[in-house]
Amino acid sequence: DAGITQSPRHKVTETGTPVTLRCHQTENHRYMYWYRQDPGHGLRLIHYSYGVKDTDKGEVSDGYSVSRSKTEDFLLTLESATSSQTSVYFCAISGYSNTGELFFGEGSRLTVL
Amino acid sequence: GESVGLHLPTLSVQEGDNSIINCAYSNSASDYFIWYKQESGKGPQFIIDIRSNMDKRQGQRVTVLLNKTVKHLSLQIAATQPGDSAVYFCAENSGYALNFGKGTSLLVTP
């Protein structure tokens, strides 16, 4: 299995609180991604990174920010969580941009009450 | 907008039969396609991929077919087993990332 660790794996929080999800990789891959998965919507891209300090928005980036200060870590932050952000969040990594396999983490289940 | 979609949300097959999962895409500029399998409570796992310069690619018990004329992708699973029960996603490349379809749930019955 690809060396991807997501933390926390489960979190329950209240509306309006900040939340940070962490993705850590040991593969030294350049590209890292955050997706959210919701019933009826499949996997939707939130943000991605194509290098240290190089990030860009995906299709559902509103309400989320990211940071990548080291190759191995990609953080997803919800500045003020809302109930609509209740979801399962997946981190993925790739060495080849959009023409290669994505390796996914095990997911982080976030519940916003 | 451009999107990747699936023809059927659920598919039930008997153990030992062949399964076919279909996917339509609308971005004619896409040149890379990939299938993932997701078991309950886990992250998606790579099954097989195909580039647009190919029509067919085979793996172990799986075959992906690409029809660029009608923008259609299919995943064939031979001799379906109970362990094949999962949600299957197709995806196409878009910018720096992959754009995923909504998924098809495959249920294998004894």
Image (cartoon, grey):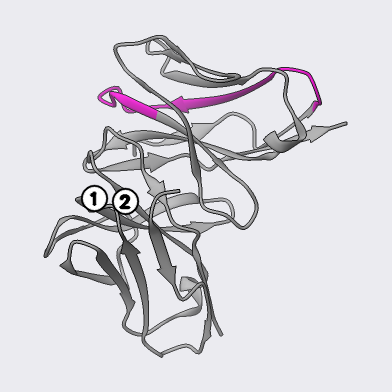
Q: Residue at x 48, y 39 (%)?
A: B101
Q: Residue at x 81, y 25 (%)?
A: B15
In-front residue for pair B60/A20: B60
Q: Are discs 2 and 1 located on one and the same chain? A: yes
Q: Is residue A42 magenta?
A: no
* Residue A11 numbered mark, or none: none
Q: Residue at x 29, y 71 (%)?
A: A75
- Image quarter for residue B21? top right
* Residue A29 numbered mark, or none: 1
- Image quarter for residue B53? top left
In-front residue for pair A40/A34: A34
Work out which quarter of the rendered image holds the N terminus of chain B and state it. Answer: top left
Q: Residues within 10 Å of mark 2 (few under 14, many from 20)?
A: many
Decide: is B69 above or below A59: above
* Secondary element type, mark 1: loop
x and y percent of residue A68 in the render?
19, 67
Of the image marks 2 and 1, the number of the one nearer the N terminus: 1
* Secondary element type, mark 2: strand
Decide: is A4 above or below A103: below
Q: Chain of mark 2?
A: A
Question: Marks 2 and 1: CB-CB under 8 Å?
Answer: yes
In this view, the mark in front (2 or 1): 1
Please report the bounds of the magenta region as a residue range: B14-33
Q: How many marks?
A: 2
In the displayed image of the protein, which residue is found farthest to the left?
A: A53
x and y percent of residue A64 in the render?
31, 71
> Which residue position is annotated with label 2?
A93
Work out which quarter of the rendered image holds the C terminus of chain B and state it. Answer: top right
